[in-house]
Amino acid sequence: MSPRKITRSSSTVNTPHLLEPRRPGRRTRRLLAAVTGLGAAVACLGAAVVPASATTSAGSEPVVSRGVTIPAFYDPPAQLPSADGSLVRTEPLPLGLSLPGLGGRRLPGTATRLMYKSTDAGGGPVAVTGAYIEPAAAWKGGGPRPLVALASGTMGQGDQCAPSLSLQNPLTIGEGTVSIGYDNLAVYRFLAAGAAVVVTDYAGLGTTDRLHTYVNRVDEGHALLDAARAARSVAGASVTSASRVGLYGYSQGGGASASAAELQSSYAPDVNLAGTYAGAPPADLTEVMKGIDGSALAGALGWSINGFAQSDPSLEAVVAANTNDVGKAALKDTSTMCVGDAILGYGFTNSKKWTASGKPIADIIAAEPKLQAILAQQRIGNLKPTAPVRLATGVQDDIVGHQQARQLAVDWCRKGGDITYEAVVLPNLGDKLLTNHLAPLLTDQGSAISWLTDRLAGRKTTSNCWSMPAQP
């Protein structure tokens, strides 16, 4: 399955200065307050904090990531089915946010944990986990019940950060780890509209055989499309091959949904794609890395480097030659982190502290043709997307930069795509704090869900590519 099995049984690396949490500065405290507020909003929907523990099958040695035991379900088997989207295994998934309903049915629906087969960027088989939720609400739009394939925003690289686990435990706290299921809000809004939802954990997030290949467009696009395929085979699922499918994602998820929209016609033509929402998509990683460097989410640089080095082992020598001891320790440390951990441990870190030359990572990439080629292959916008796309980007977004996201809309429009571009205009809420990136997620979510629900109901949309010259 993977050329290298990666063991993540320890919760931290053996580096004393990294084991000691740094006292948050003023900007970090402000950011944590915002993130905590989002977590409180999730909890106020009716969930309590669920202990970060899980059972494993008898006789197996559990994988523990930063004090959180990963259920044995997430250990892939040695052999996988041949067909992409084939189910490997399923089990009931108790939703952390649910209420009793009439006739014994839970609200907002019945959830199933999934493991299914996909194909990674190297053409090899990969086991991916996720969750399918059959809604209790009736679908009142046209046609059979539709399906939303949801790609979560950045959760981290540790297995305990998997979105399917966050559906069970909306707030997970371990030994130096914090994970909040902030995309659960969108999941529940689609369920309330009567659409079924399938959530992908992406390659390597949750599954214990490899690292998560963070922002790898092919891995993410394939995982999302294969989740839609897998949903049709879940016992009790009302969706079929005739069901309209919508792709939804913001930030990392926006990149995944955008990639899937480009890849659908060649990789998964059997998925009846009706529309895609791509919010704040990281389409040009060369530019996005510049925005992340020195920001509250600087730790995400470690996730990117780790993932690409795993996908292309020839990069290991490049990484080793260009990182100092602090950088090497940081790469190992971030590999088991969730977003909250990365903010506390590496928020506002400048990447030049990790490099052997003392230069920022952007400068190293600019001087290394192999790295430039890798990032060029990750560029989204070279293919015309299938079906209509709504692309939204905050004009103040300085983490997943506004201009590179806008350029994706321009690229797609030039290829004749049916694109609805939405520039989310908000005031500057603080440089490099993540607030300029998170605010559009919340303020635009209702419009994004309404737009995609209309596509699932078969309603037509009209491209606004003609307006791009006047759009910010």
Image (tube, rainbow, N blue to C red):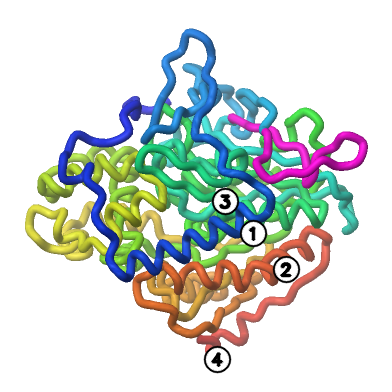
Q: Provide residue 47's location: percent of width, then percent of height.
A: 64, 46
User: The disc labelled 2 sits on which kind of residue?
Assistant: Trp
Residue 451: mark in rendering: 2
Q: Mark 4 points at which residue?
A: 470
Q: In this view, does 286 lie above or below 217?
A: below
State the CA–CA distance, disc 4 to disc 1.
25 Å
Residue at point 49%, 64% (across, down): 281
Question: Hey, what amino acid is under mark 3?
Answer: Ala
Helix, strand or loop at mark 3: strand
Is label 2 in contact with label 1 (beta carbons under 8 Å)? no
Q: Position of residue 77 (x, y in %)?
A: 50, 18
Say what secondary structure mark 2 lies in: helix
The answer for how far apart the CA atoms under marks 3 and 4 are is: 30 Å
Query: Mark 3 to mark 2: distance in Å?
Result: 17 Å
**Label 2 to label 4, Cα distance in Å?**
22 Å
The image quarter containing residue 231 is top right
Estimate how packed mark 3 is, as few (under 14), some (14 to 19) or many (20 or more) residues with alpha carbons within 10 Å.
many
